[in-house]
Image (cartoon, rainbow, N blue to C red):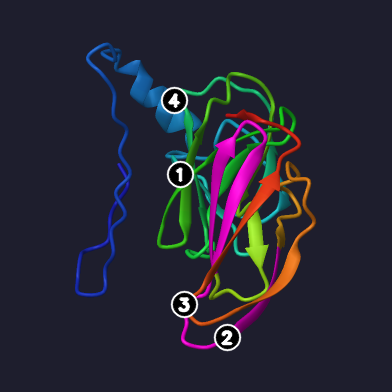
């Protein structure tokens, strides 16, 4: 049993929990999860980072996405559950996606306070993944919104929420290579928006 520190005014406790259904009655599952998911020693899977960094692996694969996201590979492996993944230090003004770089399929991700949340079925196949911003701007105050509007196009809204004119360059992320669009530089008046229709190379959501 791990010995916890005596709580005081400066103590922060992080609680990690596994949940299941009525079908999960085999107590061996808990030991399997403890061994495979980093509760007791190293995790059973391997992560090869291309950009970004691993912050933690206890239950959740926590990644640093401060450079616009994290690109990584995980070889196929059976785990007790789908692998939960977070990518922290993203810009909360911009959208986040999970891109399967081999299948060229993607899906939007929920994000809270600059952290995006995803899961991967590591048993399905080898994964080569990007989690992060599909589009970026040179001015971090610009608000970007990306929505799929057809099988072959996305709508990108570029908004200036400030009280001064902003000149910025908006472009696709280095790893989000599904767009037939190289980016643009524009000036946005205070409180104004520009909406662009962007053609896609691939049209398969994940």
Of marks 4 and 1, which one's residue comes earlier in the chain?
Answer: 1
The N terminus is located in which quarter?
A: top left
Give the residues in magenta.
143-170
Of marks 2 and 3, which one's residue comes earlier in the chain?
Answer: 2
Instruction: Identify the residue at horizontal 80%, vertical 56% (top origin).
Output: 182
The residue tagged with tag 4: helix, strand or loop?
Answer: loop
Q: Residue 28: in sight, yes or no?
A: yes
How many marks the image carries: the answer is: 4
Task: Tell me the residue that label 3 is attached to.
Answer: 191
Instruction: For marks 2 and 4, give the CA distance.
Output: 48 Å
The main secondary structure of the magenta stretch is strand
Q: Nearer the viewer, mark 1 or mark 3?
A: 3
Q: In the rendered image of this protein, does residue 99 appear above or below residue 174? A: above
Task: Tell me the residue that label 1 is attached to.
Answer: 58
Instruction: For marks 1 and 3, give the CA distance.
Output: 43 Å
The residue tagged with tag 3: helix, strand or loop?
Answer: loop
Task: Tell me the residue that label 2 is attached to.
Answer: 165
């Amino acid at each position: 049993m791990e010995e916890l520190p005596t709580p005081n005014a400066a103590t922060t406790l992080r609680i990690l929990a596994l949940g299941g259904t009525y079908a999960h009655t085999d107590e061996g599952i808990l030991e399997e999860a403890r061994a495979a998911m980093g509760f007791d020693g190293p995790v059973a899977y391997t992560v090869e980072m291309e950009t970004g960094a691993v912050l933690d692996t206890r239950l959740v694969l926590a990644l640093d996405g401060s450079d616009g996201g994290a690109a990584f590979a995980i070889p196929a492996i059976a785990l007790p559950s789908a692998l939960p993944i977070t990518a922290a230090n993203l810009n909360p003004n911009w959208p986040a996606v999970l891109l399967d770089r081999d299948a060229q399929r993607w899906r939007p991700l929920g994000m809270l306070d600059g952290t995006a949340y995803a899961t991967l079925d590591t048993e399905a196949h080898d994964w080569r993944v990007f989690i992060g911003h599909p589009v970026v701007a040179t001015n971090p105050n610009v608000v970007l919104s990306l929505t799929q509007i057809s099988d072959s196009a996305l709508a990108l809204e570029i908004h200036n929420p400030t009280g001064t004119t902003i000149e910025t360059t908006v472009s696709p992320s280095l790893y989000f290579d599904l767009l037939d669009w190289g980016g643009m530089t524009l000036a946005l008046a205070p409180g104004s928006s520009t909406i662009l229709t962007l053609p896609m190379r691939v049209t398969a959501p994940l």
